[in-house]
Each structure stands twice: as structure tokens, then as C-alpha cells.
Amino acid sequence: MGATPPGGWTYARSGVDRTSVRTALRALLGEVRYRPPPSHGRAVEGPGHYAGLVRVGRETIAITTDTVGTKALLAEELGAWEEVGEDIVAVNVNDLAAVGARPCGLVDCLSVPSLSPAVFAALGRGIDRGLRAAGCGLLGGETAVVPDLVKSPDLGGTAIGFFPRGRRPVVGDRIRPGDLVIGVASSGLHANGFTLVRRLIERFGSDLARPRPGAALPFGRELLAPTRIYVRISEAMAGRPETHGLAHISGGGVRNLVRLNSRVAFILDGWPRPEGIFHWAMEAGEVAAEEMYQTFNMGIGFVLVVAPAHRSEILRRLARAGAPEARVVGHVARGKGVEVPAFGLRYEGYD
């Protein structure tokens, strides 16, 4: 059982340093200077950056790519692959949903040290569930058997979406002070922060086969709960004028809201306090609230920023779309950044 570092565990101490990631990305992007001619499509710049947008003729296409990260290591330890198969779909289509795009296709990318038909069948069942929930087809993909590169499976994909006639991308430029922030519940940790979570499991000596105190499922199954898919939520609201912003609360926690609009302040005075698996993480590793809210979704996996006059109708519409638990978790004010008043937290930007 490992010792808790002085000051508690952070994502950086578990092995993921946000500052180093930001520096490396700036170095990479600084060298990518090529811009294709207009005949090859025109990039549409949007502050959200959940998905890349490109204009081809009269159509705008959204493209995104992501992996399930080190959650795959937990799946390997437990021999349970269906959940992360579903995650491959979810982490990608949710980013499309966050710009209001309708998913139309996904290609997977599976890098593995060896092939196992049983593992691939389980992944396939999970991918199928995710595709059905998203109304999205599997177009193809890549399976790379690379034992010299990876010792455990690296699971990801790329998704493409489009904007049905009359719908424009939702990129947060219409967000203004006075707007409401409505949150839709997550299904747990989703596929973020597992490098830190796995360090906490090592430190806490947790039994993955048994429920943690107060939980119904074995701890391992609770951790593996697949990422909730928010495509129906986006479809219900993306084309409506009262919808000013959409956000997938993934890695980066509440900081994700800054990606929508950096010229306003998001006051999250109704965001859930740490409960369930999030309370366990906070207690197990003495993780500070500041780190929790910038690493995990803390119970809210998708956010809508909407005009306040339509609150009741929006909540009814979300309930019909499968989110009866949706509720107001904050509001937009003058200023910059994100605030969580319950813990006195303030974040300036997105890392």
C-alpha cells in the first residue's frame, strides 16, 4: 500500500502533468503551419474545440477522436471488456454532441500486444451497444498488433458527424450573462482520471470484487460503468435558439466550460458535492476539492447553457429525451473563468 504524497494526491503526482501536456501540445501545434487550399474544405474555428469543424461546399462536418485511456488497464485486470467497448463510442460521440452534430459514423483504432477472439467479441458487444445508443454506424477501423509498442490494449476511435438542415454548430459564442447552466447526470467516472484512480486503488488496497461501503455493485464494476451517451440530449436541444452552449464534461472537469466562452464567468452554485465514487476518491487519496473538480465530472457529464426564459420547457424537453434528473447547476455572469462557490474554487482557464 503506497503512501499518500504530502498535500494529497493530484493528477500530476499520479503521472499526468497538465502543464507538461500543454507545453508539448503547443510545441506540436507550433510546427503545423500548413493550410490546405479552399477547394479541400475550410476549417471552421470555434472556441469549444470538442470537435474539429470543416466546411465542404455547403455542408459542415464535425470530426473528433479519443481513447478510453488507462481505463483499459482496469478492464484488462478484471477481464471485462464490454464496458470499455461502449466507451470507445461514447467518448467520441459525446464530443460531437457538444457542438450539436449528429453522429453518422465511427472508425475504431485498437492497438494490442496480441489477438484474442474472446476479448474482441466482448469489445464488439460493447461497441454495438454504444452505436445503438448514438444512432451511429461502424464504418471500419484499424487493428494494429504491436507487441513491441504496447503491453496492454490501447482502445480508441474517430467519429464523424453532420448538421441536419437548418442546424448550425453550437460553439458557445451566443452565451451571455444571465444564461442558466443545466446539468445532466453522469454514470460515474466515465473514462477520465483513471491514472489517478488507479494510484488511489493501489494506495487504498481496495478489493475490486467487493462493493465499497455504501455501494451496491462490486467496486471494480462500479469503476467500469460505461460512459453515458448524450446524443439524444443534444438532438433534443441543439437546433433550438434558446440553446447557447453545450459541453461534454470529460477530462478537465468543470474547466471544460471555459472552452465554450472565455469572456464570461460560469458560477456553478448548484453543481453536486462529492458523492459516491467521487467521495471515495476524495477520501482515499486526500485529494483536494480543487483537484477533484478539475479532474473528474463530479456527477455531471453534460451541460447545456440556455436562455433563462425557457427553463421549464427545456427541463420538460430534456426529461422526454431521457434526462428527467436534469437540473440547473449554475448561471453565467460577467467576468471570466469558472467558480464553484461551495468550495471557494475559481479556475481561470482550461488546461
Image (tube, rainbow, N blue to C red):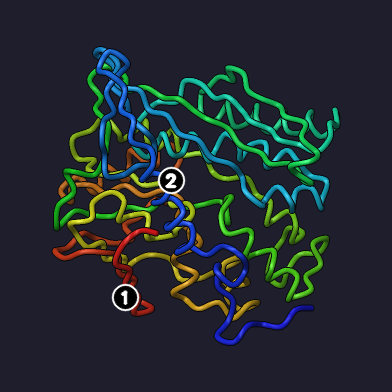
Measured as percent of width and height from the top left, residue 301 is found at 46, 51
- The residue lying at 79 percent from left, 62 percent from top is 208
Q: Circle 2 is placed at which residue position?
A: 28
Quarter that holds the N terminus: bottom right
**Distance (Cα) linking label 2 and label 1:** 36 Å
Label 1 environment density (alpha carbons within 10 Å; few <14, some 14–19, many ≥20): few
Q: Nearer the viewer, mark 2 or mark 1?
A: 2
Q: Residue furthest bottom?
A: 6
- Please identify the quarter of the rendering in which residue 64 is found: top left
Measured as percent of width and height from the top left, residue 302 is found at 41, 48
Tag 1's secondary structure?
helix
Measured as percent of width and height from the top left, residue 317 is found at 33, 38
- The residue lying at 42 percent from left, 47 percent from top is 248
* Amino acid type at mark 1: Pro
Measured as percent of width and height from the top left, residue 20 is found at 48, 62
* Amino acid type at mark 2: Leu
- The residue lying at 75 percent from left, 57 percent from top is 220
Closest to the observer, 59 or 209: 59
- Is residue 125 shown above or below 87? above
- Please identify the quarter of the rendering in which residue 204 is found: bottom right
Q: What mark, if any, has residue 341 been given in the picture?
A: 1
